Image: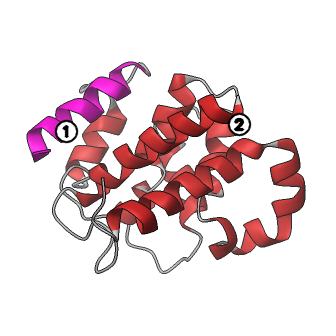
Amino acid sequence: MNLQKQRKKILNLLEKCDLNETSDLIKWLDSNNYFIAPASSNFHSAFIGGLAYHSLIVLDLIREKNKRYDLGLSEKNMIISSLLHDVCKLVPSKNGEHGRLSVYVLRKFIKLTLIEKLMIEYHMGPWSNHFKINQGPLIKYHPEILAFHTSDYEATVLIEMRGKK
């Protein structure tokens, strides 16, 4: 998908969540190169537009899991979490807690629901120190967190790093 089509698709999805091109968040995404940033420097989707590409794949996967496991996520929950979970990659930081940084950035612009916050904050799964500490109760009461983490991980390893779509 070319960059313009990918950008338009994402903007159309975000518009369903009451975010349009005039919103401060969209302006921030544009000014911080969300639509052209790579997803990583040398691993998955390390190309122009890779971050947006990765986020769209995560959205497809969490939609499948939401249906399969009857998780009860709304379309808005899935769009916000999937498309915005990695905004931390647009902010210079030496902090390894990517999910927390994404939540911090997003809270400046939009009100996240509890489940959106949790899915974004814990999307790194076992690669996040605070997930390791809290994973038992988190997954027991919010299996959506595990489904979201595995969607992100599957997108990275099974699709992007293997060149499959």
Residue sitting at x 30%, y 45%:
28
Q: Residues within 10 Å of mark 2 (few under 14, many from 20)?
A: few
Instruction: From the image, tell me which residue sits under label 2.
Output: 114
Residue sitting at x 37%, y 60%:
159
Residue 99: within the magenta?
Answer: no
Residue sitting at x 46%, y 33%:
79
Quadrant in the rendering for residue 128: bottom right
**Which region is colored magenta?**
1-16
User: Mark 2 is on which residue type?
Assistant: Leu
Q: Is residue 110 visible?
A: no
Horizontal relation, residue 43 to residue 123: left or right: left
Quadrant in the rendering for residue 143: top right
Secondary element at image label 2: helix
Foreground residue among 51 and 89 = 51
The circle on residue 7 is 1
Residue 157 location, x and y as percent?
44, 68
Determine whether label 1 and label 2 are within 8 Å by CB: no
Residue sitting at x 50%, y 60%:
154
Secondary element at image label 1: helix
The quadrant of the image that shows the N terminus is: top left
Look at the magenta stretch and give its main secondary structure: helix
Horizontal relation, residue 39 to residue 134: left or right: left
User: Mark 1 is on which residue type?
Assistant: Arg
Q: Could you give the CA–CA distance between mark 1 and mark 2, rounded to whole angstroms?
A: 27 Å
Residue 114 location, x and y as percent?
71, 36
